[in-house]
Every structure is written in structure tokens, then in C-alpha cells.
Amino acid sequence: MKMLMTLFLFLIGSQTSVTQTPAPTSADIVLLVDSSNSLGNKAFPSMKSFISKMIGHLTATPNQYRIALAQYSDDLHVEFLLDTYKAKNPMLNYVKKNVVFKGGSVKTGNALREVHKTFFKGPASGRDKERILVVLTSGASEDAVVEPAKILKSDGVKIIAMGIQDVSPEELQSMATPQFSYKFRTVRDLSMSSQNLTKIIEDVIQTDINGIIPTDITVPEREVCKSDSVADIVFIVDEGVSKPKAEDIKKFLQDTVSFLDVRKNCTKIGLVTYSSESHVLSLLSEETNKTTILQKIQDFSPREGKANTGAAIKVTRQRVFSGSRKAQGIEQIAILITHRPSEDNVSEAAHDLRRTGVTVFTIGIENADYTQLTQIASYPRQQYVTKLTAFSDLPKKARTLQKKLLNQIQDKLYVQSERKELLKAGCVDTEEADIYVLIDGSTSISPAPFGDIKTFLKEVIKMFNIGPNKVRFGAVQFSHHKRLEFELDEYSNTNDLERAIDNIRQIYGDTHIGEALTFMQPLFKRAREQRAGRVPCYLIVLTDGESHDSVKEPAERLRNEKVNIYAIGIKGANEAQLHEIAGSKSRTFFVQEFDSLKNIKNEIVQKICSKEGKGKF
């Protein structure tokens, strides 16, 4: 609710007690971005993403704004001047390739002085362009900001001050044109508001600074969580142990929970124990504090019975994660601790849990089945699966798990969505391409995993600029049959492509990849003829099994015709055949479960968008 209120004030805050004047047709906008140690290297990709989003929004109307970019910490670092770029794509490409983290202390006052000398020297009288400075800062300045901000404003520069993390609302207000200061908890929160910046720019342009009645603005801050640890975490614990081993489990759980910032708006903890039956000890929907959770862990006692791990995972999904904060974008994490093989099926239950967006860690001790641990855990297994020899090793691993949890939470908070936006911006370079996907529809793939394939494809196409003269997508499904689902020139926008993918119906049958690759040759020939052979061609092959026919020769024929092939194997796919299809290990991918396809999507798209994916066949 506080976040919504902050965004609400972000939208309306510039419209109170100000005098509106007709907006000029253009403005000079300087983006001044904190690149200090206060922000940190880990959060910097998110800041870059926000910069790209701002540029994208501000350049939607050509020639309306000139934009400059500078970073600061101890000193000012000018990235590009107001007259350097006149179009969006060159700016976005510059940000992607050249803007790097600087580090250092937060000296916002010095940065304001240097910005004044570099971009805004002299009064604005007689100009038809408004002059606007957008300051993005993450920490309390080590030098004074009031006087340099006052000098800028006296020369007609209007300042929008936006802060995250440790900067105070008062410092932001002291810099900003009255009613144009905004405080957010994290870069992610800031990024959520990027689409509103154009409106804020318009409002500040229309503001008559001579007619402003200064007013105090209170921008409510969200509760600050230790290390930004905002997550829903559920422990699933096998209780069929001896008392001494139960003490090791309790010590591990107590150390881990004590490390986390367990509060209503920070980390929430769920707890499930199981043997023959499952017992829910703590729900995510409950207002449970750290003391209460630690007491429940202290009360944990062994219980004899079978190891029905699959049933416990199902109960966790249905009863515990059903009360989570997933809809708010909060990271969802499950941690399974067991010491023996499960006596029921774990694969389907774990698949259903991961499909809801839960990241699963597994910790296996003593006789736990490693194959089952990998079936349950998220991808990649080296990151999410831990195997220990003895229970006495468990408490020693608490610190390692804490680091993994924090990395997972911060990756979700700062990196994942921003990485997608940066990657999408990077794919602007891939202005033209013809991409076919070759989909395994054989009987070994059940309906739900086939749905995962379609979801994967829809996510991939969203990363490209779809159009008849831009990036085109086509799809073919195969088993021992081949079916052309749609050609490259059939759908010319993302929405139509998504609907076409939704309408794909599985054909079933045996796996004949070689025949399917041969089937692709005339399709790519037609594609080359349509665009005079000047557009790069790609084929993405998805399969879960070993081909009953040879793949090497038809794959080589395609590559000789300059088709760049990526091979993705799931579960029972033959890795040697995948290498033969792709022609290179670097273009081969393998995941244990269909729902793990989403984890390799960005990597594949990045390869296609990069120089590595162009022209090397």
C-alpha cells in the first residue's frame, strides 16, 4: 500500500500549488545518475535499465527533447552531450555498451556544480527550450547540495530529484523545484515508475517557477528491510529423524531465520514438516513475527513415518503459497530438507510448484536420492541442489544458504526484470532476422510440458521487434509427422504470433528429428528468396528425446545454407545429437525439466542478438 501511495504521489505531486503555463515545444533534459558505492555494482544494471526506459519514453515523440547523460560519484563523468544524439536507438546502444559502474563516494553537490558549468552555464532568458535536470541519487551527499542547486534554479533550470535507498526526502526537497522530489526504496521501485517520467517532465515544463508557492512535501517511505531481503520463504522439512539429528535441523533453521529480516513487509516464513502426512506449522498469510517462527522451530520434534515428499510439496503449494505475496512481485522460495528417498512421486508435484513461480532449493543429507533432489530443485542444479554426507554438516551450511537466499532475492529485486529490459534494448541491433522454431510434439511429451514449450516461445518472441520488414517468426511441429504451424510471413505482430502459438495442438508420435530438419530446407529457401538472402536465418530446435533417424547430415546441409541452429534438449534428449544438430556446444542447451526452459530464454536470445549469433555458421 505504501508503494502504491508513493507512486500515486509521484503522479500527482507536481500538480499541487503550482502555476501552469503553456508548455514549450521542446526542452533540454540532462540525466544525472548516481554511480557511487552507495548504489553498488549489483544494483547498477537496474539503474542502467531505468536510464534506457527513460530514454525510450522521452524519445517517443521525435525532436521534442534533446537528452544528455552524465554519471557522478566523486567526480562528474559526462557520457554524452545534448547535441550528441538525435535518435533513440543510438542513445540506447551507447547506454548498453559504454555506461559502466564507476564507484566512489556520493558528492551530489560537486556534481550539480559541474553539471551547471557543462550543460547550463548562463541564464535561460530568450531561449525557447526549457532546461531540466533529472537527478537520480542513492545516498546522502557528502557535500552540500543546497547552494549549487540554488544556482542552477536561479539560471532557470528546473530540477526533478529522485532518490532511492539512503538518501533523505529532505535532501531531495532541498535540491528539487518545489513538489518535484520523489523517494523510492529500491531501483526496482524506481523502475516501476519510469513510464510516468514523461508526465512529470511535462508538468515541470508547464510550471511557472516564479509563481510557485513553496510547500512541504512528505513522500512516505516504505519500510526498509535489512539487505533488501523481501521474500516469501517456506521450509519443507522431513521429520522422520532421530532426536540428535532433529537438533541439527533446528540449529540450521534457527540460524537461517535469525539471519533473515522476518517482518510483515520484508521476509515472511512458512514452515511445513512431513513424514507419512504433512503438517503445516506456519502459513505465509499469517502475521507471524520472527520470535514466533523461532519458537515453532524450537518446538520441532521427530515423527516416524514414510517419506511422502511429493505429497508435502503439493500441500506446500496448495495451502502455504496460496497465501503468498506473489501478485506483488515478491520472490517465492521453497527449501526442502530431507535425508532419504521419497516413497511417492516428486517430479509432478515439484513441477507444479515451480510452474507457479516458486524457486526451489533442495538439501539432501545421508541417503537422500540425488536424482530426486535434482527433479525437485530449480535449474541449474549446481546452484539449487546441496548434498551433505552427515547431519552434523547441516548447521555449517547455514551461512552458505543465507548467501544463496540473499543472492536469489536481490537477483529478483534488482536484476532479472532489468536484465530482460536491457537485453530487449540490445536486440534493437537485430533489426532483421528470420527465425523458425522446430517443436517436438512426440508422445513422450505430456500436455503440461507441451504447454511449457508454448509459454517459452511466447516469451522469446516478446524480446524481438516483430514486423514484415523486421524480425519474422515461423513454427514447425514434428514427431514422425511434420506440420507447418505457420510460415514466416503469416503473422506480422507479437499479438497475432502469441495467438498462433496458443493454437498449436500436439500431434504425438515418434521422434524423427532428421526428417524434420530436412523439412526445413525449402522453408528457409523461400525465406531467402523473399528477402534476397540479405537477412540472417535462425532455427531453434526443441526436443525431449533421442531421434530415431540421423540428424548430422540434414543439420549440416542447413548450416551450409547459412542457417544458424540452436538445439535445446529437455529430459531424455541425446546430448551428442544436440551437438550434431547445432554444430557447436556453445549453441547447445540442456535442461532437466520443461519448466526450466524459462531459465535459458535470455541466454538464447542474447546469443541471437549478439555478434556471436550473426554470420558464424
Image: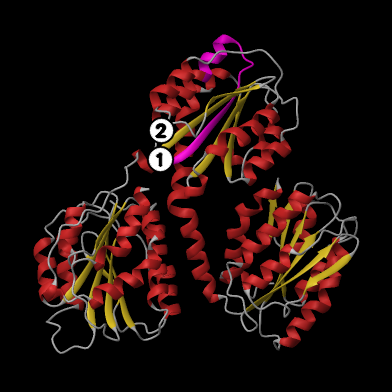
Name the one closer to the observer, 555 or 89.
89
Q: Which mark is residue 229?
A: 1
232 in the magenta segment:
yes
Q: Is residue 563 above or below residue 179?
A: below
Q: Quadrant of residue 124?
A: bottom left
Q: Which mark is residue 350?
A: none
Give the residues drawn in magenta, as a range: 230-249
Q: Is residue 522 above or below residue 373?
A: below
Q: Is residue 428 above or below residue 219?
A: below
> In the image, what residue type sits under mark 2?
Leu
Q: How many marks?
A: 2
Q: Is the C terminus in the top left, top right, bottom left or bottom right quadrant?
A: bottom right
**In this view, which residue lies farthest toward the top?**
243
Q: Are marks 2 and 1 in contact (CB under 8 Å)?
A: yes
Name the one closer to the observer, 487 or 543.
487
**Residue 117: percent from left, percent from top:** 15, 75
State the SS at label 1.
loop
Q: Residues within 10 Å of mark 2 (few under 14, many from 20)?
A: many
**Residue 605: percent from left, percent from top:** 60, 64
State the SS at label 2.
loop
Q: CA distance from mark 2 to mark 1?
A: 7 Å
> In the image, what residue type sits under mark 1?
Ser
Name the one closer to the observer, 191 or 567.
191
| x 37%, y 85%: residue | 86
> Upstream in the sequence, badge 2 or badge 1?
1
Can see residue 392?
A: yes
| x 81%, y 72%: residue | 520
Label 2 sits on residue: 260
